[in-house]
Image (cartoon, rainbow, N blue to C red):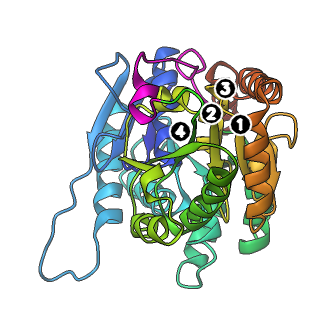
Amino acid sequence: MNIGIICYASVGGSGIVATELAKTLADRGHQVHLVSTDPPFRLGDYQAGLVFHQVNTPSYPLFREPQYVLSLANKVVQVARAFRLEIIHAHYAIPHATAALLSRQVLESGGHSVPRVVTTLHGTDITLVGSDPSFSEIVAYSIEKSDGVTAVSESLREATRRELCVRRDIEVIPNCLDCDVYKRRAVPGLRERFTSDASTKLVIHVSNFRPVKRIDAVMEVFARISRAVPARLLLVGDGPELGTVYRLGRELNIAPLVEMLGAQEDVIPLLSAADVFLLPSAQESFGLAALEAMACEVPVVASNVGGLPEVIAHGVTGFLHDQEDVDGMASSAAALLTDPALHRRIADAARSRVRDEFCVNRVVPMYERYYERVLA
């Protein structure tokens, strides 16, 4: 198949998933055209069958509003026409599905071959943007008029129907990982960079540091952990809530125990050095960061929200608590850090669940079959 994939290039779950999907589809013999403003975060080196197309958005003094949607639609028209795309797979309802639908109308009016539009909902396009009255009608329209729609979790599918009154069929296809890549990979000396004491545990959090990730809760939970167990906190990522780290580090007297490592393209070595992953988010439509940690045999302690219960089985492959239960999260983390048998059992079960349900060789064929159904 000739497939166009539209995604964001920035650090975040949707862009990572779209890029990994594109790379795997190319490995499986499809011709894939990845469209974004910049080379996506984890695109990597040249790969046969995979071509990147950059969207350039000019700036004109006359236009006060951003022109990204228009320049994106224009680029999709050009790529679809030149490479006879069969599928345009938009990751996010707006602006990407909206631009894909606009490009389809342009192609129809010119008498060209018209690709089918598949939209994958990742969460923010529904739970934050989609629920805003300023965008809700366009989000709902973009979903209803797509030829096919998928969601990354049952929770997100139900939220879409509830928030936007969408009645069309939505296929649930979970996020996935390349399990040959995402596995525990120890780097000699890495752990020792953060602590010279073998008894000190490493707690890790990876995110884009948006308010929904509740960095304040990460700090509060870790403060409680550090009072029970010698530990250090590794913070991987960057974003608007970084200032909260500095403030709470001082207020909670844990600043010397916190390492801020910034955004990292390859998180596997850091995950492999860690003992517990914290994810006390206010909302997670799936929780790709949790999945990455589980694949690297790092037990996850997280909020019982959104799609996380579809990834983590409480007490079996990790621990889930009410999002305000910072004491419960800290207690579960401390138990994992002080009970080697419990830690090993949860880590092994987490890795097994990822391999059984969330590897690319299981999930990408689900997308292929869905494309075929949409084309038929």
The answer for how far apart the CA atoms under marks 3 and 1 are is: 14 Å
Quadrant where the image shows the C terminus = top right
Residue drawn at (61%, 26%) of the image: 296
Instruction: Give, as a single range, the part of the protein colored magenta.
Output: 176-196
Reading the image, the residue beneath label 2 is: 275
Residue extending farthest right: 315
Q: Magenta stretch: residue 339 in it? A: no
Answer above or below: position of 34 versus 279: above
The secondary structure type at the circle numbered 3 is: loop
Reading the image, the residue beneath label 3 is: 297
Mark toward the viewer: 4 or 3: 3
The secondary structure type at the circle numbered 1 is: helix
Left or right, 313 with reference to 150: right
Left or right, 368 with reference to 45: right
**Mark 3 neighbour class, 10 Å CA radius: few under 14, some 14 to 19, many 20 or more:** many
Reading the image, the residue beneath label 4 is: 17
Amino acid at circle 1? Leu
Reading the image, the residue beneath label 1 is: 337
In front here: 157 or 70? 157
Q: Are marks 4 and 1 in contact (CB under 8 Å)?
A: no
The answer for how far apart the CA atoms under marks 4 and 1 are is: 30 Å
Mark toward the viewer: 3 or 1: 1
Q: Are marks 1 and 2 in contact (CB under 8 Å)?
A: yes
Place of residue 341 in the rendered image (x, y in percent of width and height, measured from the top left): 82, 24
Residue drawn at (40%, 57%) of the image: 109
Mark on residue 134?
none
The answer for how far apart the CA atoms under marks 2 and 4 are is: 25 Å
Amino acid at circle 4? Val
Amino acid at circle 2? Asp
In front here: 107 or 162? 162
Which is nearer the N-term, disc 3 or disc 1? 3
